Every structure is written in structure tokens, then in C-alpha cells.
Image (cartoon, grey):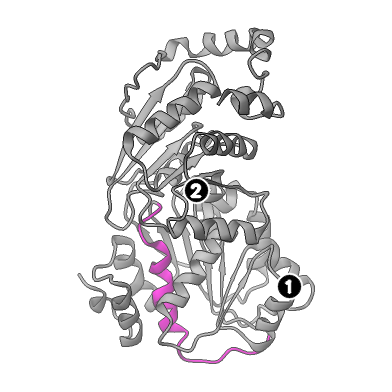
Amino acid sequence: MTFEDLGLSPEVLRAVQDVGYTTPTPIQEKAIPVVLMGRDVLGCAQTGTGKTAGFTLPMIDILSSGRARARMPRSLIIAPTRELAAQVSENFELYGKYGKLSMALLIGGSSFVDQEQKLDRGVDVLIATPGRLIDLFERGKILLADVKILVIDEADRMLDMGFMPDVERIVGLLPKIRQTLFFSATMPPEIRRLADKFLMNPKAISVDPPASAAQTVTQGLVKLRGAAKEKRAALRSLIRSEGVKSALVFCNRKRDVDVVFRSLERHGFSVAALHGDMAQPVRMETLQSFKDAKVEILVCSDVAARGLDIPAVSHVFNFDVPSNPEDYVHRIGRTGRAGRSGKAFTLALPEENKYLAGVVNMLGMEIPLVQLEGAEEWQPGEAADEGRGRRRGGREGARDGGRDRGRGGSRGGDSRRRG
């Protein structure tokens, strides 16, 4: 099947052709005709499968007729993070360039004045994070009575981040008669219940088992004794042996991001850091440097696990095993995109075995073990004793960087000296 078979307008097809895409992904193939029919959609597909274009392409056609009024957007897209919202706006700019739709992006860290000026002129497409949208609504800068299409993107992430009360409030302000598109990479029971509240007789579209890893990603697991120092050494060894030119390194906590970033920088790698405490302009500049290949390795928190559409990422490294198993899928989904192959390596200490077990249980398969020269492996049965032994050895550990040395804590000076 081609995009021409989906019922899209010549203008949209021309924009798609300019980008170089000829064949729709499964979620696009199934969702686009249904959206064009005006039906509600409950879409579930793993990250990296083209969900964003699955709703932006038909929305451009649906909204091509009509005119926006001041402060009254004709459509609303709610996204959980600034990066994801920015990615959605890029899709509209990319595929809507032969149309005349106006768009506003409402995210934190950007000027209220600029956003208000766009709203005053009237926008066809409003893309927003929940907090900034509510701020502007409470200031009287937005009226939601004319929204004809609502998109809730990455709904499971919205739930994880505690945004759902805000989303429910926003939905309560919208017209009852509207088209609602509800997209999520996973569909746990909580999300299914919310979908039942928001949607009316939706067409359910699922192209992959929930929380499944992309087949284009080769996974590997490295089990390590020791602590963060050994992890950092193992990470450097993997990066060198793989000849990495474009990689994401995920840490569970923001302070770990800084420690790993400094370690890699000190050892001569081309590296940058990205986490939620950074100012928005700095975050966007850092992302652009990575996209432009000015930086080879981006060390990040889960703020980058979703919303990053950079097809050329060849590797993902989980410096920490994610505590939420579904985050594992989102992280490794940053590679192996757009038909490319990718590799994902996870570094695990004994005390992370409970998180690792959750990931394995969700995947329904063991992650293949990778032998690393000089690294001493551990067995699952040893994990609990190993963790207790490490806690008992806190005084000894303090001499080598403190109890938090494996977590990039406040004793960062020791971490920096020791690699």
C-alpha cells in the first residue's frame, strides 16, 4: 500500500513525497482512513512506528476547510513533554507546508507574549503541554468551545507523569461533540478506563502487542559486579568496541546524568547532557546539536525516552535498568527507527535484578547476555545478598566515593576523580 491509497489530498501527498516516504507504516495505514472518516480512534503502537504522522496527515486535510477565530483553536493536541510537543509541531510544519493552516505551540520555558499573540490571531492547530495550556486558559487567553478534533498523545506517559487530572479537566472544557484521537504506546488498564471516558465508539487500532520491542533493535544485557565506577568503565568499553557515532545513554535520575556526562567528557568522548532541570532553550539547543551530529553521545533522563524522532540513532545504552518496565521499550525505541537497524545495551548491577525481572517479564523473553572482557557477572540468586552486602559495606564504600557513588550523588568529586 502507498500513501496515495489512503485518501489524502494532493497537497499532503506532495509534502510526504518531499520528505521521501512512499510506504505508510502499519499504524498509519490503519489509522489515517479512519481519522479521515471522522471516527474516534484508540491507537496503540510501539514507539517509533509513526503514530505522529498517523494523526497529523489526516488532520491537515480535515482542517483545510474552515477558518480559525481569535483565541478559539479548531483542534487541540495534548502532549506530555515539551520535546514531544515540539516534534508534533515539526510534523505539521513538514506535512502542512502546501496548506494554509496556522499553528501555535504552547510549552513551558517559552515566552507567554509570543504564544498569546499567536492565539489572538487565531490558530487551526494548538499543540500544548497540560500545564501551559491550563495557565493560559486561566488567564483568559484561550477559549476551547470551538475545538473539533482532540488528540491525546502518549497517554500512558501522561499517566506516569501525573498529568491525567489536568487532562481530564481540559477534556471537560471541550465541546461534547468532537472527534477524539487517543494514542498510546502501551495500554494498561488505567489507560483503557480513561479512553472509555474520553472516546465515543472508537475504532481500536493496535499494530503490535502492547509494550513489545521493535524487531529492528538488537538487544544485549551486561551483568556487572561492583558499582557505578564499574558501570562507567563498561559503558566506555562498549561505546569504543561498537564504534558508536550516534547514541543515547539513559540514566534513571538527573544527577546520574551529570555524573555519566562528566565521566564520558573527561575520557574524550563527544558528549552532551539532557534532563528536565535544564532551561528550555538549552534543551532545544542541545537536541539540535545532537540531531546535527555535532555531538555523538547524548546522556539523558527519561525526558528523552519519548518525543525524540532522530532516525539515525544507532545505539541506546541503559546505564540504569528502568524502574518502570515499559520505559525500557520507550528507551530502546529511540533506535531502529524508520526501517533502520539499531542496538540497545543494558548495564545491570545485582541490586537492579528486581527491575530487570520486570523488564524480562514484560518482554516475555530473556535479554541476550553480552560478555564484556574483564567484567565479572552475577547470577539472579545472588542479587538480594549482593545488595545487602553492599549496604553493610557502606563505610568501606565511603572511602571510594560514598554510599551514593553508584547513583551520582552529592559526593560528585570522588566520582569525577575515579572515572
* Label 1 Cα crowd, 10 Å radius (few <14 / some 14-19 / many 20+): some
Determine whether, in the image, residue 154 is placed left or right of residue 137.
left
Residue 358 appears in the figure: yes
Determine whether, in the image, residue 163 is placed left or right of residue 191.
right
x%, y% of residue 36?
Answer: 38, 78
Residue at 29% across / 61% down in the picture? 26
- Asked if residue 393 is among those painted magenta in the image, a careful observer would answer no
Which one is nearer the viewer's eye here, 90 or 265? 265
Disc 2 marks a residue whose amino acid type is: Ala
Report, in whole angstroms, how far the alpha carbon at label 1 lies from the one at label 2.
27 Å
Label 2: which residue? 305
Residue at 42% across / 70% down in the picture? 55
Q: State the image quarter where residue 125 is shown.
A: bottom right
Label 1: which residue? 112
x%, y% of residue 126?
Answer: 58, 75
Q: Secondary structure at mark 1?
A: helix
x%, y% of residue 293?
Answer: 42, 56
Find the residue positioned furthest to the right: 139
Region rendered in magenta:
47-71
